[in-house]
Image (cartoon, rainbow, N blue to C red):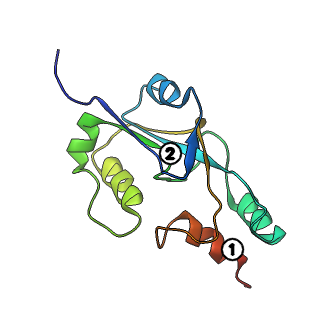
Amino acid sequence: MSRGARWLANTDADSHVFPDWLAVQLALGADAVCGVVEVDDWSPHAPRVRHRYEAAYVDADGHAHIHGANLGVSARAYMRAGGFPPLPAHEDVALVRALEGTGADIAWSARSRVRTSSRRDPRARGGFGDYLRGLAADP
């Protein structure tokens, strides 16, 4: 039996994973799993932010969302893809694109779920919090 990590499950410090989160990722049998996120609390935002978010978000299998807060990848696929690139933002997207480039089997699953923060003062510039802030801007 080999030593070392076999599966890398990624989330964010301000997110909550469900008790079966890791089991769901592993049960999908893919090289990588891109899961969905649920926003924990919409109250810091104007109602239009939630409306715009829900109008654009696909909470179903086959979605095309990439969230660093809900991403799992086999160690082998991660190494083949070159790992997370050293980017200030969207390193999760870059990794998934690299995985696609290697022919990795990616499960785009709504079964893998994470509840994430809707904070108005995000710590990571260019990430999910800034996306929500952008939805608040007038068109």
Q: Who's the residue at 70% across and 82% down the image?
A: 137
Give the residue drawn at x 50%, y 45%.
70
What residue is shown at x 53% (from left), y 31% (from top)? 21
Placement of 20 over or under 79, stated as above or below: above
Residue furthest right as drawn: 47
In this image, 22 relative to 50: left or right? left
Q: Amino acid at mark 2?
A: Asn
Above or below, 104 against 30 in this view is: below
Q: Which residue reaches farthest top?
A: 1
Q: Secondary structure at mark 2?
A: loop
Q: Residue furthest bottom?
A: 138
In the picture provided, is 33 more to the left or to the right than 16? left
Rendered residue at 79%/62% (across/down): 43
Neighbourhood count class around disc 2 (C-alpha, 10 Å): few under 14, some 14–19, many 20 upward: many
Q: Which residue is mark 2?
A: 70
- Label 1: which secondary element: helix
Q: Quadrant of the N terminus?
A: top left
In the picture of the structure, the residue carrying the numbered disc 1 is: 135
Q: Is residue 20 left or right of residue 22?
A: right
123 and 3: which is toward the camera: 123
- Image mark count: 2
Q: Could you tell me residue 49's position as x and y percent? A: 75, 69
Label drawn at residue 97? none
Q: Looking at the picture, which amino acid does disc 1 mark?
A: Leu
Find residue 139 and report its horizontal and vertical position in percent.
72, 85
Nearer-the-camera pick, 33 or 87: 87
